[in-house]
């Protein structure tokens, strides 16, 4: 047993009898189970994936135009309003359909989560709109989610060679900048050097960019740009001197590196789990077979796929027709009347789902950490882009960046929207865990305020103690909240005060 004596400010000594005494304390994180999709939700999830695949070549500036026309073949065309009507016709997307009428529902423990995913598709009037369709479950404050302005700072200065060990938090920013360049390929933009997003004009180009870029690069570049432009930290970190005591750019990067490492570990652990959902391409193939009535299995899993396929055929027949026509145009003559195979685009065929397995969890973690540490409690317009007159709200653009990353995975048919919804909130929980540990180790009064992916204003508040670590709590207004995804605490160890 290790016996560690810790001097306190008084005449007391703290003798810690833990076997982990002297080591950084890391709380266990509970990984959530895969989303439990009932037939109605599965139909809505597949409908959204089909819709995004059909409009992948639409210009980003046209996504809020209901009259934007998509031409599949010389005889088949539709506009975004007609596409939206097909989605709205599904019971899961229609707020007027009560939960009790949605047929087979998830298990009771998952009902709140499923209801949350359902409501995330609607605006304040409980309607699915073009504005809410592209925000990927993020409660954006200004409508739809066009391309995040932070892509303007996403400069690729070289090939990424990470993951690499991170420098210590006390390392100078010059060392952290070199680490970013090698680890994720991120760097500051220089005069005459264009951003790496110069050619992102469509959803398919967004997806290609996200698939090729390391998951942390855009966030590292944005952090370097924010620090270079003097963006202030949250005023709740200010001590008696009026400055954020102990909080430097190096420490921020150290926390980002820790959050990215934990997020990558969590995402890869979930990827290897046996209970993960079948990929959308597999689900689309099963639906094709079910609609052709060539599969007669009657087990519960197949009944769910059959129910989802029948719901799509009943409520969104035009959508299935457009997908079938697109498959015929891309793959010549098809054997089935309803040919729902994914992916629809030839470019997406080279993008494997595992290529972005970590992207949304990492994005959720790094965005949350940046929103909390930088002062985003009030809208603050920052000069981050290369143009002198370009300004952006850092907190809002971080949310858009996460939404764009999630949207890219749906466009290619690699992941379900429900998985994106869960992954970004898992990343948020990881960031809160990292920040909680850092604030408790500081053992002083401090607070961090940020807006989460559900639109809530949350605050991390830490309180000092006379010995050992401080204590931190998560609050929404005057209400104390449980820490998300926190596993059962480890067994207590002996601590004596003598």
Image (cartoon, helix red, strand yellow):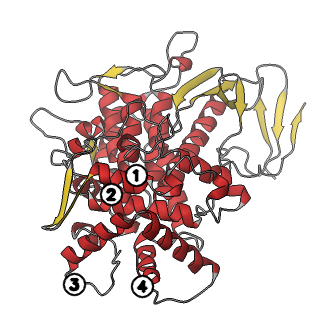
Can residue 170 be seen here? The reply is: no
Q: Are marks 3 and 4 in contact (CB under 8 Å)?
A: no
Q: CA distance from mark 2 to mark 4?
A: 24 Å
- Which residue is depicted at the point 51% across and 46% down? 259
Decide which of tag 2 and tag 3 comes sooner along the chain. 2
Q: Is residue 312 above or below residue 218?
A: below
- Say few, some or many: other residues with alpha carbon within 10 Å of mark 2 (under 14 / 14 to 19 / 20 or more): many
- Say few, some or many: other residues with alpha carbon within 10 Å of mark 1 (under 14 / 14 to 19 / 20 or more): many
**Residue that label 2 marks:** 52
- Secondary structure beneath disc 2? helix
Decide which of tag 2 and tag 1 comes sooner along the chain. 2
- Which residue is depicted at the point 34% across and 40% down? 145
Q: Out of 258 and 497, give the one closest to the viewer.
A: 258
Decide which of tag 3 and tag 4 comes sooner along the chain. 4
Q: Is residue 490 above or below residue 36?
A: above
Q: Out of 420 and 331, give the one closest to the viewer.
A: 331
- Secondary structure beneath disc 3? loop
**Residue that label 1 marks:** 406
């Amino acid at each position: 047993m290790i016996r560690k004596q810790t001097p306190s400010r008084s005449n007391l000594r703290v003798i810690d009898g833990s076997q982990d005494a002297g080591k950084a304390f890391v709380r266990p994180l509970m990984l959530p189970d895969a989303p439990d999709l009932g037939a109605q939700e599965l139909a809505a999830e597949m409908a959204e994936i089909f819709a995004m695949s059909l409009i992948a070549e639409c210009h980003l500036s046209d996504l809020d135009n209901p009259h934007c026309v998509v031409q599949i073949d010389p005889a088949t065309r539709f506009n975004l309003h007609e596409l939206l009507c097909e989605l709205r016709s599904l019971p899961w997307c229609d707020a007027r359909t009560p939960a009790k009428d949605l047929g087979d529902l998830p298990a009771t423990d998952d009902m709140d989560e499923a209801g949350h995913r359902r409501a995330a598709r609607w605006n304040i009037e409980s309607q699915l709109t073009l504005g809410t369709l592209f925000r990927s479950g993020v409660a954006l404050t200004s409508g739809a989610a066009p391309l995040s302005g932070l892509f303007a700072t996403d400069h690729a200065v070289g090939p990424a060679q990470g993951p690499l060990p991170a420098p210590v938090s006390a390392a100078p920013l010059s060392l952290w900048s070199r680490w970013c360049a090698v680890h994720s390929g991120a760097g500051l933009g220089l005069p005459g050097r264009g951003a790496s997003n110069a050619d992102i004009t469509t959803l398919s180009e967004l997806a290609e960019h996200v698939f090729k870029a390391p998951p942390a690069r855009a966030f590292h570049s944005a952090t370097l740009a924010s620090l270079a432009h003097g963006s202030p930290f949250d005023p709740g970190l200010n001590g008696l001197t009026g400055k954020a005591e102990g909080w430097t750019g190096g420490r921020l990067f150290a926390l980002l590196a820790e959050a990215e490492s934990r997020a990558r570990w969590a995402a890869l652990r979930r990827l290897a789990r046996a209970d993960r959902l079948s990929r959308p391409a597999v689900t689309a193939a099963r639906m094709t077979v079910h609609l052709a009535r060539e599969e007669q299995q009657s087990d519960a899993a197949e009944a769910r796929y059959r129910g989802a396929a029948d719901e799509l055929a009943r409520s969104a027949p035009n959508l299935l027709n457009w997908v079938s026509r697109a498959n015929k145009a891309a793959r010549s003559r098809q054997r089935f009347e309803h040919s729902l195979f994914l992916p629809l685009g030839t470019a997406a065929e080279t993008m494997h789902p595992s290529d972005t397995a970590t992207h949304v969890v990492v994005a959720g973690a790094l965005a949350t950490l940046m929103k909390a540490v930088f002062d985003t409690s009030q809208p603050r317009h920052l000069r981050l882009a290369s143009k002198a007159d370009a300004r952006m709200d850092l907190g809002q653009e971080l949310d858009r960046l996460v939404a764009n990353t999630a949207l890219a995975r749906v466009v290619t048919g690699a992941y379900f929207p429900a998985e994106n919804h869960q992954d970004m909130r898992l990343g948020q929980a990881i960031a809160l865990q990292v920040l909680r540990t850092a604030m408790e180790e500081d053992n002083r009064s401090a607070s961090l305020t940020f807006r989460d992916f559900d639109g809530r204003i949350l605050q991390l508040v830490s309180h000092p103690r006379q010995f050992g670590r401080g204590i931190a709590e998560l609050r929404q207004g005057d209400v104390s909240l449980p820490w998300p995804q926190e596993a059962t605490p480890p067994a207590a160890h002996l601590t004596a005060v003598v």
